[in-house]
Amino acid sequence: MHTSARFPGVSPPELAIHYRTCPLCEATCGLEISHRNGEIVRIRGDRADVFSHGFICPKGSTLGKLEKDPDRLRAPLIKRNGKHEEATWDEAFELIDSKITPIISEHGANGVGVYLGNPNVHSMSGVLYTRAFLKMLRSKNLFSAATVDQMPKHVSSGHLFGHPDLIPVPDLDRTGYLLMLGANPYESNGSLATAPDWPGRLEGIRERGGKVVVVDPRKTRTARAADEHIPIRPGTDPMFLFALANVIFDEGLVDLGILEGHVAGLDEVAAAVDGFGPETVAHRCGVPAATIRRVADELAAAEAAAVYGRIGTHTAEFGTMASWMVDVLNVITGNLDRPGGAMFSRSAHEQPRSRRHFQTGRWGSRVRGLPETRGELPVSVLAEEILEPGEGQIKAMITIAGNPILSTPDSDRLDEAFASLEFMVSVDLYLNETTRHADVLLPGAAPLRRPHYDFAFYQLSVRNIANFSPALYELPAGTPDEWELLLRLGAVVTGQGAHPDIAALDDGLFAMTVGSAVGDPSSRIHGRSPEEIFAATDGGRGPVRMLDFLIRTGPYGDGYGEDNDGLSLNRLEDSPHGVDLGPLQPRLPGDLCTPSRKVELAPEALIADVSRLRAAIDRTPMSGFVLIGRRHVRSNNSWMHNVDVLVKGKERCTLQMNTADAHRIGVVPGGHAKVSSAAGSVVTPVEITDDMMPGVVSLPHGWGHDFEGARLSVASARPGVNSNRLSTGEMDPVSGNAVLNGIPVEVIPA
């Protein structure tokens, strides 16, 4: 028996084992946590986990360190006379009410901006109740980490498949040929493709006689393990992909496979890639034309193949073009929606999606009129929306589990902007480089003190899996869970005051969810009594109750008595190693959300951007260097840098550069370099390596822990430098995603 948020009266035995899904990255690895009298004895991989089978990376074993971190906040902080001091929860919310309410009264909801950080998608409350809070606030000034990471994929998927979350993933366990661009899963554990043990899965492709090809400016750990590494100049991935499609059309190799008759726009795509022949783009990509032709032929000839592009392709000036062409190649080679190709997950909590015409630009940013995408504005414009005077100016900010001053572009200006706000609230575990500006800081629950289910990542899983983890520890008496403080914030911004009835708010939210489902003809419980469903749902309150409802009404659920063998939260609790729901299955055309019920291969918004890409082919090459990012297996965003076991050892915040480049400019091993862009400069240690393509340098993101006022004792001892001081705020115009790769920089010895 283990302590559970649902059974708070149960105490842990003298020695117990707690099984849990790791919440620190997208891989969803199973953990086995041995604990005694409230102390964690050991964390290792759960060998019985149905998905990860014991695989674990260095991050997963540190959850106990995070729980005990003395810098982690346990009580609210209020800034008094420029210093943060502990306060009661009532004091914190009363101050928020006294400051936010007048701002909304005078400037409207848009006077309050919101930034959502990456950890929100690793939290049940972050997924479900942040959404509820945003609906209560109704501000159009929403920003998130998505526009420094993955927005191109949401945009291309929205246009092609009708929904921005209908994202195909490579069927790693059955494919015979994997073409991977801008991804380094040996370090990142995968992204927008949930799979524990990427190294083992990639090795499995080779053991089956298949081939793994990695396209990247740097010979990453993943590239070194692949069958072939193809160096490419940063930012030219879409030209390479267009050229592959050009060869497939030109040589008559197009084969739609099972999607024959379910694809629109094939002729328009053929016309779009015309003129992007291998010989035309080779000089810009740095990839020989013969290599491009060979890869295109291999891709078309493979019995089962998948093209997969990730953050290196998204965080560039043509990020949406690259994302689009990845899916185009999977379609025209007959590899979309077939085993071994690129397929769609079916999560246990999935609900029916409505068919609609996907669109962006329903509103625009105040200063430059840049279009909204998926309900949010590009984070690259956040600073100007705060600093530029005029009607609609952001006067207050709420940040939730984010550190945009380190993780978003032009960070020095954003630091200035946050300092100018009339009021700021942050929900976070730490007083970090961003939250040091907060007038009120509300600590969320640490990972081991909240139940866990991966809403976001089971929608992107390479195998259909469901796993629920109850909380290991209770929250301290009087401490609200994260969902409760988000509802309380929602009550403040809707004029209900600082002391609302949280239970009534939660019941109202749940009743709305149930009412929507019983009124939806496509729902499994359409026409049922809301009162019956409300009474039968297990789990008490909060996200656990909501999860039980979503599981039971999902594709594998019991349907509230409709299928006695179906899933429910109780069954998940009885399966601590997870429930294996089987390999991915073909889902098209039935699950397409486009009005035409076809894959719309040539959306107008994407076809219109081809001319911009075509013009870039003959652009004069940049002199000097271009900067790209980098991941490390022990680092996932800035907040993990305060865990000593993850940052100890060899310095990792270094500028990697090619040996010949270093010799040419006079940088020596162990030396330092000054890196300058149009936005700013940093001085950093240099790591000289032939893994780097000539003319390309690399800095990792998420560092720069040298801001006065933050309380990160471990991170501040090894601060590194903030690579976003070099990002200029340029964006991919189709998605609004920040350009963080291919930034022109000057490098000189320091």
Image (cartoon, rainbow, N blue to C red):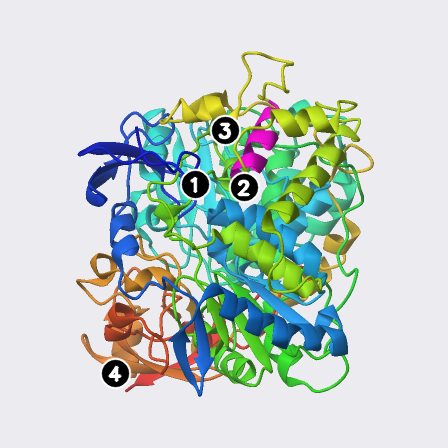
> Helix, strand, or loop for circle 2?
helix
Nearer-N-terminus badge (4/3): 3
Instruction: Quadrant for residue 168, please give it.
Output: top right
Image quarter in which the N terminus is found: top left
- Viewer-side residue, 309 vs 106: 106
Label 2: how many Cα within 10 Å (few below 14, some 14–19, many 20+): many
Instruction: Tell me which secondary structure the magenta stretch mostly adopts.
Output: helix
Label 4: how many Cα within 10 Å (few below 14, some 14–19, many 20+): some
What amino acid is at disc 1? Pro
Marks 1/3: CA distance?
43 Å
Q: Is residue 317 above or below residue 535?
A: below
What amino acid is at disc 4? Gly
Q: Which residue is mark 2?
A: 543
Q: Is residue 404 above or below residue 341?
A: below
What amino acid is at disc 2? Pro
Nearer-N-terminus badge (1/3): 3
Q: Which residue is mark 1?
A: 451
Nearer-N-terminus badge (2/1): 1
Residue 628: x %, y % from top left: 43, 66
Residue at position x 64%, y 70% from top? 113
Magenta stretch: give its range: 542-555
* Residue 229 as seen in the image, left or right of residue 255: left
- Viewer-side residue, 700 vs 413: 413
Circle on res. 302? 3
